[in-house]
Image (tube, coloured by chain):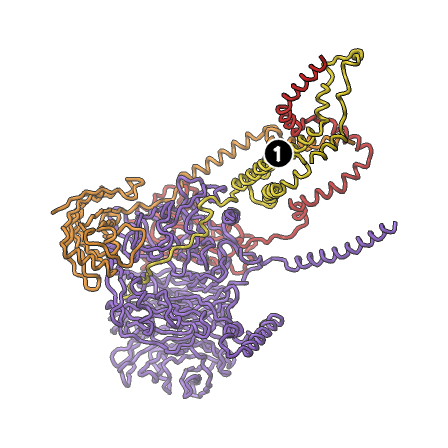
Chain colours: A yellow, B purple, C orange, D red
Amino acid sequence: MSSKQQNRRQKWILDNTRTNKADLASPPAYVSSCVPQSHEVSKKTDINRLITKKSWDLALAPVKQLPMNLFLMYMAGNSISIFPIMMVGMLLLRPIQAIWATKATFKMIETNTLGQMIVYVLGHLLNIGLALFKCQSMGLLPIYSSDWLAFVEPPMRQEYLGGGIALH
Amino acid sequence: MANIRSICIITINLTLLSCLSHALYEDQVGKFDWKKSYVGKVKFAEFDARKLVVGTEENVVAALSSKTGNVLWRQVMEDPSEQNIELLKIEKDIITVSGNENLWTVRSWDVGTGNLITEWIISVDKVVLYKFDVKDNNLYVVAHDGSMLNVRVFDVQTGLVKSSLQIPFVATNNQCILVQTYYACLVHNVVNYVQLKDNSKVSTIPLQSSENAKISTYKSVTPAIIITTSSVNSEIVFFNGDNHQKHITPVMPNAIGVIDSGTPLIFQLEGTKNPSNLLIKSTIVTNGEELTREFEYPHGLGKPELAAAQCIDHVCNLLLSSADNALLLVRFPEAKVMWTREEALSKIVATEFLELPVSELDASIENEFKGGNVISMFLHRITTQCRQLSNLVFGSQFLANTGLVRDDFGLHKIIVVATKSGKLFGIDTLTGSLAWTYRLPNVKPFKMLDSEKMLLFVQRTARYAPLPAQCTLLAEDSITGNGIIIQFDPITGYSEKSIIRLNYKIRQALLLPNDDENHVKPLVVYSDKGDAFIYPESANTAIATHASHTYLYTVDVNKNTLNGHNLYREGENIKTTLSWTVNLGPSKLVALSAKSPIERVHSQGRVLPDRSVYYKYVNPNLLAVATIADDPIHKNVLSIYLIDGVTGFVAYSTSHKRAKGPIHLVHSENWLVYSFFSERFRRTEVVAAELYEGSTQSNSTVFSSLAISQLPHVETSSYILPAFPLTLAVSLTERGITNKFLFFALNNGVVEIPWLLLQPRFANVACGPEESCIPYMPEVPLPNEAYINYNQTLERIQGIAVAPARLESTSHVLVYGLDLFYTRVAPSKTFDLLKEDFDHILIILVLVGLVIVSFITKYFASQKMLKQAWK
Amino acid sequence: MLKYSVLIFFLLCRMAPLYCLEQDSSVSIKLYHSLTGVKEPNFTERSTITIHSLRSGQAIVDQKPLSQQDKIQLQKLAINNEFYQIKAVATAADGSKQEFISTLKACMLAEAELDERLSVSLDYTGRVIGITSVVASKGTCEGSSVPLSKFKDFTTNVYVRHSETGPIPDTATYIQKLEREREARERGDTKDNRSFIAKYWMYIVPVVIVMLISSASNPEAGGGN
Amino acid sequence: MGCRNKRPPQLRVDLSLYVCLSHLSAANAELPNSLEEVNDNARFTIEGRVFPLSDYQTTQSNWQTNTRILINGGEFRGFVKKDGSFLINNVPSGSYVMEILNPDYTFEPLRVEINSKGKFRARKVNFIQSTVVPVPYPLKVKALTNTRYFQVREQWRLTDFIFNPMVMMMFLPLVLIMILPKMMNDPETKKEMEQIQNLTKFEMPEMGDYVSNLLAGTSNSPSQDKKKAIKNKKRQ
């Protein structure tokens, strides 16, 4: 794996060590402080850096979705109709699916991405939490005693009574 | 999942808020309801052209079509318990006199339309027997005080006194009749009569034998009386001025006179050798020429009597009224029964809804495993399923032989009805037609508070296929006052044992909840001596284990006490012992309501807006009792008690000052609704009281009245009902999931009011649309859409019988009184049925269309693909 | 040994004047019990209860001690799952006497160690309509064997239960509510001339936000062309 | 006033008090409740007339027979004559609610009060408020409306279908998909769109970039500093 990485690095390497600022005089009206720092460019072009950035992008995607989802859920309202239900359902299902597929998602990133994975999963869990909160505020979670009321069996009657107005 | 309930509630609530109850669509009229109009037992009947005008014991004047027997118009006068019709005569108009001992109302009605023409009153101070008759537009009012006749002659139209005269006439009052202008009295062995005019003298008709003699009016145009000396022998005496003339031959006691094209005829009814046939005899008065016709008297009717007759061009209509209040019209020379009316149904004293048996085919499938070997069972299965398939394809003509077959939704039932005259009826709920009738001789209902009731119990339903259903009716012998028991099959009306006349008086009866080995629920009859008897006797051992859990209560209306009894088994007998007493003392017990034994309570609590549960106090043994006490300060005080029938524990009591009857109680689940008239505010008030256990359930598995851990918490609220209720009932559904409707019988019909509208709101809990709660309104709205009888008039409603259908959403409702009205109600709409206007055709068309379109597009798509491939 | 116990109960207390009797009076109740089952009841005197004031419901219970034989009988009743019956003779202030019978399961009484509640129900005038003996329990029993040592003496709690005054339709608040609504409507009619944005800002703001977000989320699509 | 003409003559001979007052008595009639006991054998006659709706004759041929007048829910009953007038005889003094019932028409109930002197006062029934809306006596009762007992079945209408939110939601995207690309084909609109989009273009910081920068920055910066230092050293 490391050799492969090495290869890749070879492929894309841009040898900026050779560019030596000291060798050349600055062009006229060039102020060195105004130019973007060359080592930053070097950082950006750094493959490792790119990969981490990509992996963090991936890991943070669910968190980035969160405000959007929040807004969507706010807009969906608490009424129970087909669209809000579909939205909540999607919100609940997608993170679950994504969590299951975490490994697959991070497969293409070949560095050690445990941290990112954890952040990724946590982000999705946050989304699930949001969905559950939404379900709760919509009243879809059976967390109250009244939700189980329909299943309470009527008590058995122990005595039996009959009679009425005395006819004689 | 949890929210499904709230969704239901919200939708229900929305519908509630939108129209407060669900109404019928106009195209549903008559689809599942029917109404039958009755007039009551006929007291007076007269023909007029094509109409038959009757005055009945229900204080009703009505015109029936003589062709069909249908009611053309009907005018209901005052309540028959206060006023009675005393005279009905057709002069130019119909003249009726109705009233009580010192006040009479004289009314004249238009024959054609039934409009009132005049109305005036006669009020007198002296209470003696009064006799009325009309002759030539004069109303003769005769007061006879034993020695003197005080006669007043009024103008019928205006009520002006034309003349008044006094005629000395000595006779006891009870055997006197007024026939047109003749007043006749039976005195010892002679009949004295006098014509009501100035200076007329009393004449005498001597009698051959005076024992058991009776005199009655001879219904005819000419003034005449019938003197009956024995049950088959009587004679007609015609009056003519101061003279009289006897008819040549003796006649039957209920002979009737009619004029056919100028010839006076006498009609009589006679029995024949064939017990199912009757003989009509017409005799020409002048020459004694006779014409007789025999006809088959309809089976199941009581002893007939001639009530009225009419002849037009030698075709005569005879109106027969039977002992069981039925009316028959017989066309004379043909001797054909034109129509019959069962007027007994105007006085219903017991009702019960029964499930029908399964069809023969379904029953045969149930019998599948009773066959012998495997092959025969297989063949049986194949043949029955083939028949089922053919039924499905060709319609159910195979089942048409009886028609009384159970349906899937339990919407087709049979209503068993017992009437005051002792006649039982089986009525089909789908059509309202009579499935069977059964007449019980010498039977009368029990007196219960202000109504009359018989006790009808269902001992076995039609569910136990080879065994027939079994009902038991308890009533009173009209001669001895002892109890009678009759067991019958409610589906066919067939009684195996016929009437059992008991040698004791019935105090109460109770149907035990457990079946014996024949699936019969034993009936315990409690006698006035305090003994208990079991029917059927064979069930004695079967109930041994249940006896100790069975309790009986009796309410003594005379002493205003309630007593509880324990049942226990001693040897072969069931004994009772007094277990509790409640003494309501000087207050008068006016109403009692127990819960329906078949009621099921689905929800054990009420959900509060914070989604916690407030548990209901559902005590199936709770009795609601209403008493009215005379109070020197507050006039009348109404007290309502909720008493546990097992222990006698008074769970709740409340009182209303200056309240007046009529009191109506309805008791269901954990609540009670009662209505009364508030004299203070001069309006009808309805109070709803609800009992709760609290936020915990003390015992969720068994309920025992003996174990009281906490007192029920009572919530009440009061409403104004802008009407005068006649009775009150509540809907009943199979599993108790559906919302409840209250039925208020008013003078213009029955109104359904959702219980949610009356349910007490908690004081500290918000109430609004978000909480699916209808805000409190002090006046109960009665929208027109809530009338379940829509524009059909229901007169003098006496009761509402309710039964569940197998469909949870629906209950059967039978409203009885002078009219009989049946309908089905669905308090939460028919949520378990497709809507009636569900468009099957549209759905099929759309689906077919989509399939076709998809095929077409598929074809075109492949074409296009081909083209693209070639490019 | 005589045991005095004064027990005061205010039951169903929500509003005291609701249950105020017009005339206060006193009642004395003599309790008899039958320890021979309900089939042939044989009543013997058990206790005397004096309620001096029905209004306050204060009761003085004068209990007669139980003899050893009574205890054995009671135990037997409890074992055989039979009924224990009491007869109460209430003597009102005017001297009128009324007799009430009440039955309860002997085993329940035994399990509760003879702790019973006596419910004295009154009608609106303060006349006794029923006296019921009740054991506070959550369930019943089908016969139980309780050792004799548990049987000491009856502990009787007396509950005097008055008749409530029935509710009357609450028209006053309803009228007020209607008036308030009408006023609110009138006020609402005059006040409702705010600007369009002032009225519908809550609908406009989300739309603007959505537009902003959508344009921000695909800047490439816009600028890329 | 047809009712006065048709009223039967008073029977003075032996009718105990037959009072028929037809003047308006809404004025100073006392509350009859207090006077009930004074003279309870006095009996009065309530009179009035029912006025049909204009379409009466056409829809209900025999409305007089189908109309019933009930006092206090049936304590006393009155019938309507052909001309619409009615009488209710033999009513003792007191306060009554009069209902006029007809299966097809709705009438307003009235409260009729008769004092022991035989003065009549009629007003509208209001159970909730004690406001008195007097009604002239003898009563003239007009049918309010045709009674509607039935719900109206909803008819299927195209507009309902089109304006159904679901249908709108399905059709609007369709419209957008079909029409927008065509609009885009037009170069001028394209330009306009671009302009609009340019206007609303904002430079939003990439969040992932930011976070990775942040994380990378914190983790890498010391090493980079070291590298820098090394470089600097080398240079020197």
Q: Residue C171 or B681: which is nearer the viewer?
A: C171
Q: Residue B406, how many percent across, how many down?
A: 50, 69
- B222 horizontally vs B9: left or right: left
Q: Residue C18 or B236: which is nearer the viewer?
A: C18
Who's the residue at 52% across and 31% down the image? C187
Q: Residue B130, how many percent across, how many down?
A: 31, 67
Q: Residue B828, how many percent across, how many down?
A: 50, 53
Q: Residue B134 or D53: which is nearer the viewer?
A: D53
Q: Residue B565, how many percent across, how many down?
A: 26, 62
Q: To which quarter of the image does residue B668 belong?
A: bottom left
Who's the residue at 57% across and 54% down the image? D55
The answer to whether residue B375 shows anywhere in this view is: yes
- D57 horizontally vs B653: left or right: right
Q: Residues within 10 Å of mark 1 (few under 14, many from 20)?
A: some
* Amino acid at pointer 1: Gln
In this picture, is B116 found above or below A149?
below
The answer to whether residue C130 shows anywhere in this view is: no
